[in-house]
Image (tube, rainbow, N blue to C red):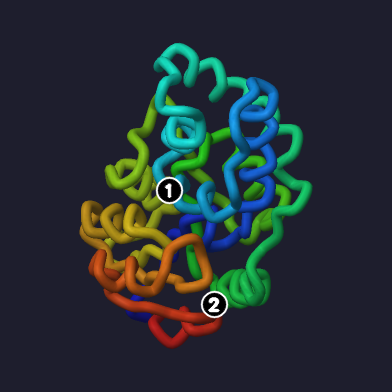
Amino acid sequence: MKYNTIIFDLDGTLLNTLDDLCDSVNAILLRHGFPKRSPLEVKRFLGNGVGVLMRLAVPETCTDEEVAAYLKEFKEHYEQNMENKTRPFDGIMELLLDLHRYSYHTAIVSNKFDLAVKALAKTYFGNLIPVAIGESLNVRRKPAPDSVFTAIKELGSDIKKTIYVGDSEVDVLTAKNAGIPCIGVTWGFRSREVLRDSGANYLIDTPREIFTLL
């Protein structure tokens, strides 16, 4: 077995979270009289954590202190509304069931805040993905490789048999920084061209294709 451990990004890779994220962003923007953002804009802002998301979503004239306050409001709103429209991408549940059946080790590593990552992983995937790590004060966010190393340690896996699956240039760089190969998925929040130009080792169009690479 070439690889026995698969580490997944969350947003845009396993779950289509865009609508709920967009709704929470716009709820805060409208609350403060700012213009709404389109799903396309929010999609473009994703990948580097919710702090960056809110910084980009609010007007440039906002101070850091104001953005911090809006971020707190966003997190509170999102925690209450993050399962309204979010769904696994087509084929993801079947893939995870098969990986579980064949005893592959799986984890989630995300730049979404840790509370949301763990809650979404439990709700949608249960015991199919036992380790889920998000952004926190204890672990630097991607593209730093810290969360990948933590996941591998918690799984009791070997980094030499680990592969990373994600949908963005941040994911590709994270895998590179961790010294592991990256599968770029084309159904997520970035284009095939972005993934290719970022240096993804493999590009796939459906979850089932992961098995051909393992």
* Residue at x 25% of width, y 64% of height: 198
Sequence-wise first label, 1 or 2:
1
Q: Decide which of 10, 19 is in the foreground and name it.
A: 19
For label 1, the SS is: loop
Give the answer, above or below, for where 33 lies relative to 26.
above
Q: Decide which of 168, 140 is in the foreground and name it.
A: 168
Give the answer, above or below, for where 100 lies relative to 59.
below
Q: Is residue 103 left or right of residue 36?
A: left
In the image as oriented, which residue stretches furthest toward the right? 84
Percent x, y for residue 178? 25, 54
Mark nearer the viewer, 1 or 2: 1
Give the answer, above or below, for where 130 lies relative to 28.
below
Give the answer, above or below, for where 28 lies relative to 22.
above
Q: Decide which of 32, 123 is in the foreground and name it.
A: 32
Q: Decide which of 77, 139 is in the foreground and name it.
A: 77
Question: Circle 1 is placed at which residue position?
Answer: 47
Q: Which numbered tag is attached to residue 206?
A: none
Percent x, y for residue 116? 61, 38
Dividing the picture into quadrants, the one containing residue 146 is: top left
The N terminus: image quadrant = bottom left
Q: Is residue 22 left or right of residue 113?
A: right
For label 2, the SS is: helix
* Residue at x 39% of width, y 59% of height: 168
Tell me the amino acid under the disc marked 2.
Answer: Pro
Query: How dense is the environment of label 1, judged by Cα within 10 Å: few (below 14), some, or many (20 and up)?
Result: many
* Residue at x 44% of width, y 46% of height: 154
Percent x, y for residue 145? 29, 46
Question: Circle 2 is placed at which residue position?
Answer: 207
The C terminus: image quadrant = bottom left
Q: Is residue 47 left or right of residue 144?
A: right
In the image as oriented, which residue stretches furthest toward the top? 65
Query: How dense is the environment of label 2, judged by Cα within 10 Å: few (below 14), some, or many (20 and up)?
Result: many
